[in-house]
Amino acid sequence: MSNKPENLTLITDDGLRLDGRRADEIRPMKIEIGVLSRADGSCYLEWGRNKILVGVFGPREAHPRRSQRADAAVIRYRYNMASFSVEDRARPGPSRRSIEISKVSREAFEPVIMAELFPKTAIDIFVEVLQADAGTRTAAINASSIALADAGIPMKGLITSCAFGKVDGQIVLDLNKEEDNYGEADFPVAMTQDGEITLIQMDGHLTPEEIKKGLELVKKGCKEILEIQQAVLRKKFETPVEEISEET
Ligand code: CDP
């Protein structure tokens, strides 16, 4: 969030944003499932100009042994930005930012992953951001949800994530890069299928009324994303009725 150049208008008088969206619209999303043959589950997701690859491994014996939990699997989430994913080269290796994003994203999944079924094991979620254009943590969570399902990890439901923000004084859904740079606030959220919030963060300033309005927008965005996620999973896992009747 930096100072906006005086002549830059992010939302026109007609209510259109720089990429042609209205305030309540998310960027186009494309999901591919099972793209990595060595991972137990994987997903490639494009959301606007974001490109994210996720590999899930496990449940597998947790190493080092002292990291094991006797009563459940440990969930590990590593968010990494490729050095070529941003305009200025990102320094390789963990940063304060990537450690924070990894932590909050892992916590966003903990309420739904049935870790108690797999004591002493680890479930690893590796996120590689190949191209970043604002909203990479939310994009990565949406992709991880699919990769976890692809790996067959038992979950109580999918996690879906989307941000809202404040741009030119208006509350809008799913900020793009210009809006993230020159907007007044960014508020990423993740939630369960039942709408229970598992991640909430805020950068900038918002009034309680603005947050209330933004959360309503985010609920709408997450519902749309959930439908996209479910369609992808159905396409991969649903056996056509004809095939079942042929087999029996
Ligand atoms: O990506 P997300 O919105 O979850 O996180 P952010 O910290 O709010 O970053 C917003 C955007 O800034 C990223 O999506 C990148 O496009 C950009 N960024 C960058 O250019 N260089 C970095 N080292 C980190 C972020």
Image: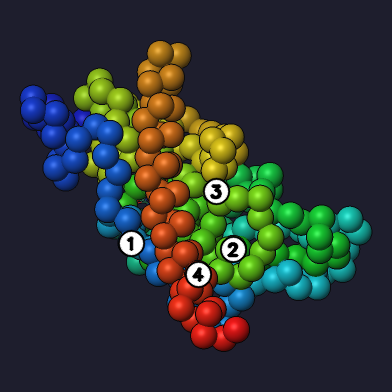
Above or below, 37 against 30 in this view is below
- Name the residue at 32% across, 56% down: 29
Q: Depth check: 60 or 83 in front? A: 60
Q: How many marks?
A: 4
Q: Earlier in the sequence, mark 2 or mark 3?
A: 2
Give the distance between the C-alpha atoms of the residues marked 2 and 3, in whole angstroms: 10 Å
Above or below, 27 against 221 in this view is below
Under mark 4, the amino acid is Glu
Ligand 1 within 8 A of label 1's CB? no
Give the distance between the C-alpha atoms of the residues marked 4 and 1, in whole angstroms: 19 Å
Instruction: Mark 3: give few (<14), some (14-19) or many (20+) Cα within 10 Å.
Output: many
Q: State the scheme by which the image is colored.
A: rainbow
Residue wearing tag 1: 30
Residue wearing tag 3: 159
Instruction: Mark 2: give few (<14), some (14-19) or many (20+) Cα within 10 Å.
Output: many
**Cβ–Cβ below 8 Å for labels 2 and 4?**
no
